[in-house]
Image (spheres, rainbow, N blue to C red):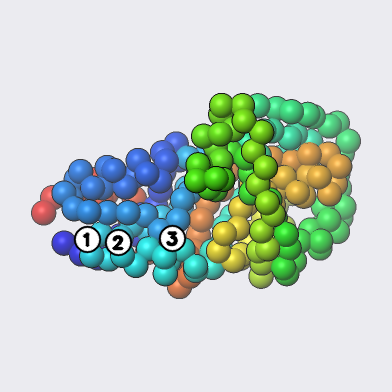
Amino acid sequence: MHGILFVDKPKGLTSSRVVELIRKKLRVKAGHTGTLDPLATGLLIILIGKRTKEASLFLKLDKAYEVKAILGMETDTFDSEGEVLRRSDNEVTREELEEGLKEFYGDIWQVPPRFSAKKVGGRKAYELARKGVNVDIPPKKVSIYSLELKEFQFPHFTLTCDVSSGFYVRSLVHDIGEKLNVGATVAGVRRTRVGPYHVEQAKSLEEILDYKA
């Protein structure tokens, strides 16, 4: 069996775990084409059989996300599941947030989260961070093609963005919080597109695992 599976990844599972479940169900070689955090949902592309050799082609594709975030809180993982490092009671208006977002259009330099799968010296950054190792990750140039504030009810806000490959939504939200001097962290992420492929094309993991050949 060779081909591509579009999976709507559920919250709470690692991308590797999704691949493992599909591999066991279909009894085929399989691999994903770009990690989604356990907290994240949405489009996860799984390559099967000989198509696994094409993974690098998919990694280079642009992505689109919807992200829900919280102002006034900063965590070590840049999401709501991490340890809270600081809080701020300073209120931010919609106008102030929209003004701050203007700094994040186009090409920007971004530092990936310490708790990420980014390789540092051949090791995944999160493996080192969990051991208390001070991880120094160099910034990377990435692009934001569109960034829109969809909902705002302080301290909660929702963004949609179209971005280049290698982009970290958690870092974007963290940097927005830094810009506004109140901190910000991700509450939820949904990947809606990878290149020309959309989450509407995907099947739920439950549907795939219930499949009977």
Q: Looking at the figure, which quarter contains the N terminus?
A: bottom left
Identified at 61% across, 53% down, the residue is 168
Residue 47 percent across, percent down from the top left = 30, 60
Q: Is residue 150 above or below residue 84?
A: below
Looking at the image, residue 195 sits to the left or right of residue 25; the answer is right
The amino acid beneath tag 2 is Thr
Which residue is drawn at the image coordinates 26% and 47% (left, top)? 22
Residue wearing tag 1: 49
Q: Which residue is mark 3?
A: 199
State the CA–CA distance, disc 1 to disc 3.
22 Å
Q: Which mark lies nearer to you, 1 or 3? A: 1
Residue with the mark numbered 2: 52
- Describe the element under mark 3 as helix, strand or loop: helix
Nearest the eye: 167 or 201: 167
**Residue type marked 1:** Gly
Position of residue 45 relative to residue 70, above or below, is below
Residue sitting farthest toward the bottom: 196
Residue 188 location, quadrant: top right
Q: Residue at x 56, y 29 (%)?
A: 130
